Image: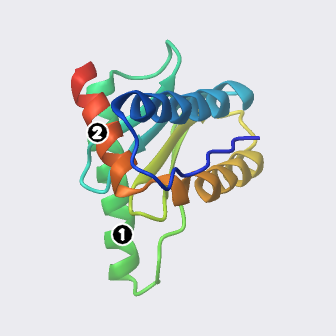
């Protein structure tokens, strides 16, 4: 459904741009296919917004990275404080929406914002599937290309 295959050979700039578009398409498809989801963002381990798919309900792009990174950091700190092991998912439930943050295999963060009526079990399952599918393709090269593309868009 959301298949991305890694490219073993170095890519040209055009191919890199194609991979960015493909990655953004995967996030956009995730956002539009799940009822209630209005924002999907991939944030690097060091807090840089790498890719995002959102609708008009989503917050300004400048807020996505610090909120995602901060929420994840609080989860990690709480787990360490309570000697609870790895954090699997951080969930913030608000009056009108929820924000779920999960770690991707490379340390990046996937953040999904959805309406409160969204089925949390389905959302969690689909986020896990997405992370498993894209985690292996987030090579240093693709992260760098995503970072460059995001910086150029600012």
Quadrant where the N terminus sits is top right
Residue corresponding to mark 1: 76
State the residue in front, 68 or 16: 16
Q: Quadrant of residue 123?
A: top right
Q: Classify mark 1: helix, strand or loop.
A: helix
Q: Quadrant of the C terminus?
A: top left
145 with respect to 3 (left or right): left
Calculate the distance from the C-alpha at mark 1 to the C-alpha at mark 2.
24 Å
**How far across and down, in percent of the image, does residue 80 sit?**
34, 80
In x, y percent, where is residue 135? 53, 57
Residue 37 appearing in the image: yes
Sequence order check, earlier mark of 1 and 2? 1
Image position, residue 46 (x, y; %):
24, 54
Label 1: few (<14), some (14–19) or many (≥20) C-alpha neighbours in 10 Å: some
For the residues bearing labels 1 and 2, Cβ distance under 8 angstroms: no
Say which of 132 and 20 sits in front: 20
Q: Furthest residue to the top?
A: 56
Residue under the point 76% across and 42% down = 119
Disc 2: which residue: 147
Q: Is residue 91 visible in the rendered structure shown here?
A: no
51 relative to 130 in the view: left or right: left
Instruction: For marks 1 and 2, give the one nearer the viewer.
Output: 2
């Amino acid at each position: 459904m959301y298949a991305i295959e890694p490219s073993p050979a170095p890519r040209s700039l055009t191919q890199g741009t194609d991979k960015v578009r493909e990655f953004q398409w995967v996030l956009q498809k995730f956002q539009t296919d799940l009822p209630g989801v209005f924002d999907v963002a991939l944030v690097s381990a060091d807090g840089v917004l790498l890719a995002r798919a959102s609708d008009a309900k989503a917050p300004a792009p400048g807020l996505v990275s610090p909120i995602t990174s901060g929420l994840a950091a609080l989860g990690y700190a709480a787990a360490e404080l309570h000697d609870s092991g790895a954090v699997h998912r951080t969930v913030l439930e608000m009056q009108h929406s929820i924000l779920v943050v999960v770690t991707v295999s490379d340390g990046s963060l996937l953040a999904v914002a959805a309406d409160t009526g969204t089925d949390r079990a389905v959302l969690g399952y689909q986020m896990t599937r997405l992370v498993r599918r894209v985690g292996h393709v987030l090579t240093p090269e693709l992260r760098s290309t995503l970072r460059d593309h995001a910086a150029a868009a600012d």
